[in-house]
Image: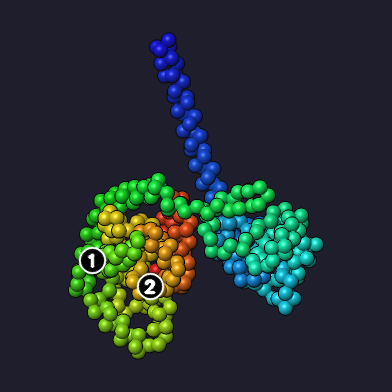
Amino acid sequence: MQLAAGLALQRFSPNVTGALLSWALLLLFSLFVRYGFRSLLISAGRYGRPISVIGAGQTAAMAIQHLRAHPAYGLNPVAAYDDNQELHGTTLNGVPILGTIEQAIIDPRTEQALVSIPGARAETQQRIVNATYAAFRHTWVIPDLFGIPNQALQPHNIGSVASLEVRNNLRSVQARTLKRTIDLLGSGLGGLLLLPILLLIALAIKLDSPGPAVYRARRLGRNGEPFDCFKFRSMHRDAETKLKSVLDSDPTLKAEFEATHKLKNDPRVTRVGAFLRKTSLDELPQLANVLLGTMSLVGPRPIVQSEVAKYGEIYAVYKQVRPGMTGYWQANGRSDTSYDERVGMDNFYVTNWTPWLDMAILIQTLKVVAMGRGAY
């Protein structure tokens, strides 16, 4: 019996293996075609379903800005409505405000509606949501819960009452173990594979300007504990003296530095340093930080003690995790973002963390670095 089963398995296993391989290749091909076709439509400005925005306040403006900056969501705001008649005939982040909310419901111009009226009374919100539900095929509702984690929400019904469960994924032992395992594998293998490049970069730095190839910068890590963050030196040895001289003599540059903690044309940066920053190669020594457990491959950006006050209440969220070699803000604009935007992105990352978010950030970082966007 066992012999017969073994012979049967040997007979059919090549066919099964071939079928599984064909299925896997077909799946990969279909995903590639789908992604490529979507990318072409996005590039041509033809991707996304038109959506009407109900409400023209600050939250609606932020939603419109985000949808237009990220067309992969598949929603294209084309009209806005608000009961404030002074806004009629104007635009909200480029979207025309056509009339009142009642007009949007009586004569819907799209099949999609985004309801954004935070701050309105509960009965008003319920009435408008019920009306849009009847008038539109799909209704999206922005609740009056601005700032809470949105990737870790789980809806529930408690009787006839809708509730939202907010999960802290990083409190899970399994999640933290998985993240640390990926860090160890990634930094260990990456360090070995990149060792020749690391040595060449160190040599180039030494030949370009006097000083050590690697320097240590004091930063705050998980639970607020200070650590030495390693980086390839990209500045002259007298960098702080140069910076003070430039800022004292140029109010415009001083304002830029105070707003972003960076300068686009930084006089402190060496020739080799400019290339390293453009390509983010100056951060490769942080692989050692990841191995030592003071940093992660992906996380919020490392900050100094003086920045804690600027983070305010968000710092309590920030220090739950290790800072990262790359993060949400590096993958979404890098140095082209304002300081406040970076703080917001750090908060978003920590409160919405998933392993898939880390993977997406790593892939997007490679894309951004390859295109040289937002680095200086």
Judge depth for marks 1 and 2 and give the one in front: 2
Q: Which of marks 1 and 2 is nearer the N terminus?
A: 1
Determine whether the residue tagged by mark 1 lies in a helix, strand or loop: strand
Point out the residue furthest to the bottom here: 249
Task: Tell me the kind of residue under disc 1.
Answer: Val
Identify the image quadrant of the N terminus. top left
Q: Which residue is rendered at x = 56% and y = 48% of the image?
A: 34
Read off the residue under disc 1: 214
> Where is residue 93, by image quadrant?
bottom right
Would you say residue 94 is visible in this rendering? Answer: no
Read off the residue under disc 2: 307
Determine whether the residue tagged by mark 2 lies in a helix, strand or loop: helix
Q: Where residue 61 sits: x, y (%)?
A: 61, 69
The span from disc 1 to disc 2 (Cα, nearest Å) is 24 Å
Query: Compared to 242, does 293 lie above or below?
Result: above
Q: Where residue 301 sits: x, y (%)?
A: 38, 64
